[in-house]
Amino acid sequence: MGLLSILKKLRSNSERELRLLLLGLDNAGKTTILKQLASEDVTQVTPTAGFNIKSVLSNGFKLNVWDIGGQRKIRPYWRNYFENTDILIYVVDCSDHHRLEETSYELAELLQDEKLRGVPLLVYANKQDLASALPSSEVAQHLGLHLIRDRTWQIQACVATDGTGVKEGMEWVCKNMPIKK
């Protein structure tokens, strides 16, 4: 198949293409999840200074995943990436109890932004393999997910380093993709 026919095929399936925004505090596991999705080696992951973009296929959908760094100095720039987001994925380090309030605040700020209004939310409750990790139900309570009424949402327990729960989260994404107009 030539390049032109591949491009035509991609264009004809544009309704099966999604833009996913992957956010969360630094060291939450965003890039590791992205590498798992792309079937890449996760043993050498370095902090994201800016952003990473990968296109992955999942359940017949082309997912364009934007992984934006989560360091405090980068977070004000997150809003530059909100335009045309189909699904918001927020990653939480469930073993970092000291930063639960900070991550809850950041998520609440995201959900109030006009450009993300109504965008479905997937929260990965990451690092479930660690003894100090809170269960996803407690993380949901801390984040106030039960108060969300303006969008569909899901919390998915996961272990990014071995991929546990990552696929299930992507299956939810594909089932809850917004209808493109």
Image (cartoon, rainbow, N blue to C red):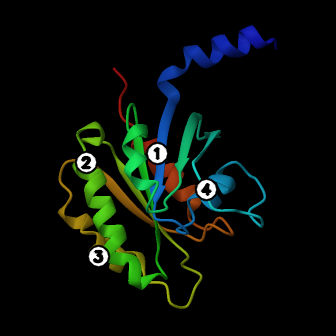
- Amino acid at the residue labelled 1: Leu
Q: CA distance from mark 1 to mark 4?
A: 14 Å
Q: Quadrant of residue 116?
A: top left
The residue identified by callout 1 is 21
Q: Residue at x 39, y 77 (%)?
A: 99
Callout 2: helix, strand or loop?
Answer: loop
Q: Earlier in the sequence, mark 1 or mark 4?
A: 1
Q: Is residue 81 above or below residue 151?
A: above
Residue 24 position in % (x across, y down): 45, 61
> Which one is closest to the eye, mark 1 or mark 4?
4
Instruction: Return the residue found at the far right.
Output: 1
Residue underneath mark 4: 48
Disc 2/disc 1 C-alpha distance (Å): 15 Å
- One can see residue 83 in this view: yes
Mark 2 and mark 4 residues within 8 Å of each other at the beta carbon = no
Mark 2 crowdedness (10 Å alpha carbons): few <14, some 14-19, many ≥20: few
Q: Residue at x 56, y 65 (%)?
A: 165
Residue highlighted by disc 3: 142
